[in-house]
Amino acid sequence: MIRFRGEYLEAVASGRKTCTLRFKRPKLQPGDRVRLAFGRRDRPTILEAVVREVAELHIPGEVEVVRVWLEAPTDEEAERLWETMAAEQEGLPSPSYGELLDRACQDSGTDLLDLLVDMVYANTDTVWAIWFEVVDA
């Protein structure tokens, strides 16, 4: 079972949200049937789905950049660090997982910077993306 906040029910049922990002390794594989639970734990709304893809995204470099940015002593220093790091990345090829990470964020409705900040606070550099297809909406 994959739990969601109740506010995501409509987005998942309509197919606008087809992925979820989790910080714990899922015990799911493509083809597995899974129940998606929304809202209250004692009386959730349940949708049936099939797992389409599971991907592990190990992104320590990006998490460390955000960690340094968050730990900057002042807003001015944070802005200077951000600009310096952006300039250092200019012209470099995209990492091999870049498209997968972008797709995971888009399909889950998650802002990349918000994800990275959450990863800093969770003290992890790995996130698992689980794509699913609702079968009874």
Image: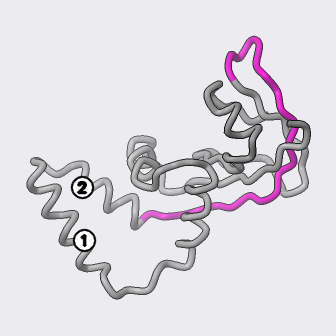
Q: Amino acid at mark 1?
A: Met
- Which stretch appears magenta? 39-60
**Left or right side of 30 for 80:** left
Q: Is residue 49 left or right of residue 107?
A: right
- Residue 18 position, x and y percent, is 71, 49
Which residue is the site of mark 1?
Answer: 85
How far is the residue under mark 2 from the one under mark 1?
10 Å
Residue at 27% from the left image edge and 72% from the top image edge: 86
Q: Main SS of the magenta segment?
A: strand
Residue at horizontal 53 percent and vertical 72 percent from the top: 98
- Residue 84, percent from left and from top: 18, 72
Which quadrant: the N terminus?
top right
Q: Looking at the image, do the residues carrying marks 2 and 1 touch, with CB atoms under 8 Å apart?
A: yes
At mark 2, the secondary structure is: helix
Residue at the image point whose x is 57% and y is 72% from the top? 99
Residue furthest out toward the front: 14
Up the image or down, 90 lies above or below 27; here it is below
The residue at which mark 2 appears reads as 69
Crowd rating for badge 2 (residues with CA inside 10 Å; few <14, some 14–19, many 20+) = many
